């Protein structure tokens, strides 16, 4: 096969992949992109290219917070600020963003370096959560706030309205339990950090002085602290 034929095949494959991505974005977010570059960048991990999702993730994180706050404000008109904040915090965690990313089919479109892929980055909550936020950022840049609003509400589906009562964060619940039972305030300690940079694992200990303690793991310090607080609450109950 000569150079011209190989070049034509590569070009055809590139056009096919671009059309497939464009169709997926349109079906998933309700917006057919004019410029695919931001969406390709939103799906690109730092191990693959310098032009990766990090800047778009920064933007998308803020857009998601605004859109979700607005949505909750509409859904729960009688709830006070504290209850709305609990709902918001529960809906924009990295784990939830990663769960949404999996449900809408992000994984096949990820662009990862070989080492990152071998290390399991395609199933990392950290990576998938960041990519989901980056995609929201890409939608916002091209379709504005209205487009981002539609994308978030479509992708999060009934997650925003699923719980009748505002969820209480496990760390807040543990703090309240300690105060109600005249115990020392909870403390959190990193016991171990493992895994590659893009997919770390943290093992944390939550303790109420010497009264009780529990350990748990997570893909971030915050996630591990929350899991440890949950484990300790289960012990106390």
Image: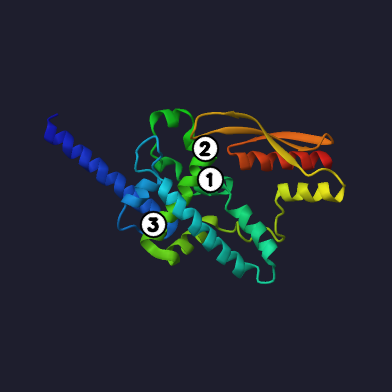
**Picture quadrant of residue 166:** bottom right
**In this view of the protein, can residue 31 be seen by the observer?**
no
Residue drawn at the location 77% of the way across and 39% of the way down: 232
Query: Which residue is at 52% across, 41% downward?
Result: 126
Q: Real-space Cα distance between discs 2 and 1?
A: 8 Å
Front residue (pair 176, 218): 176
- Point out the tag, 1 or 3, that comes first from the N-terminus: 3
Do labels 2 and 1 touch, CB within 8 Å? yes
Describe the element under mark 1 as helix, strand or loop: helix
Q: Secondary structure at mark 3?
A: helix
Can residue 169 be seen by looking at this rendering?
yes
**Viewer-proximal residue among 121 and 220:** 220
Residue under label 3, please give it: 26
The Cα–Cα distance between marks 1 and 3, rounded to whole angstroms, is 20 Å
Q: CA distance from mark 2 to mark 3?
A: 25 Å
Q: Position of residue 40 (x, y in %)?
A: 35, 47
Mark toward the viewer: 2 or 3: 2
Q: Position of residue 137 (x, y in %)?
A: 43, 55
Q: At numbered mark 2, what does the secondary structure look like: helix, strand or loop?
A: loop
* Nearer to us: label 1 or label 3: 1
Q: Is residue 88 above or below residue 8?
A: below
Local crowd size for mark 3, using a 10 Å CA cut-off: few (<14), some (14–19), many (≥20): some
Q: Position of residue 205 (x, y in %)?
A: 71, 34
C-beta proximity under 8 Å, tags 2 and 3: no
- Residue annotated with mark 1: 98
Seen at 73% across and 42% down, the residue is: 229
Q: Residue at x 50, y 29 (%)?
A: 196
Query: Residue tagged by mark 2?
Result: 124
Q: Residues within 10 Å of mark 2 (few under 14, many from 20)?
A: some
């Amino acid at each position: 096969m000569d150079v011209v034929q190989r070049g034509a095949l590569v070009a055809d494959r590139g056009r096919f992949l671009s059309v497939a991505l464009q169709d997926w974005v349109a079906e998933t977010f309700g917006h057919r992109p004019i410029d695919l570059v931001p969406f390709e960048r939103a799906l690109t991990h730092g191990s693959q290219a310098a032009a990766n999702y990090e800047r778009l993730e920064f933007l998308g994180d803020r857009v998601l917070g605004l859109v979700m706050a607005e949505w909750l404000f509409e859904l729960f008109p009688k709830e006070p600020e504290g209850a709305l904040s609990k709902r918001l915090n529960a809906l924009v965690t990295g784990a939830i963003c990663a769960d949404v990313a999996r449900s809408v089919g992000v994984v096949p479109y990820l662009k990862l370096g070989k080492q990152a892929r071998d290390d399991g980055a395609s199933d990392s909550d950290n990576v998938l959560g960041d990519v989901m936020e980056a995609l929201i950022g890409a939608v916002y840049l091209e379709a504005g706030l209205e487009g981002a609003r539609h994308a978030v509400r479509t992708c999060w589906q009934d997650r925003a309205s699923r719980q009748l009562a505002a969820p209480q964060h496990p760390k807040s619940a543990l703090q309240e339990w300690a105060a109600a039972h005249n115990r020392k305030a909870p403390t959190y300690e990193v016991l171990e950090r493992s895994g590659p940079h893009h997919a770390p694992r943290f093992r944390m200990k939550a303790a109420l002085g010497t009264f009780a303690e529990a350990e748990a793991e997570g893909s971030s310090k915050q996630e591990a602290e929350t899991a440890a607080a949950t484990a300790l609450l289960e012990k106390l109950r």
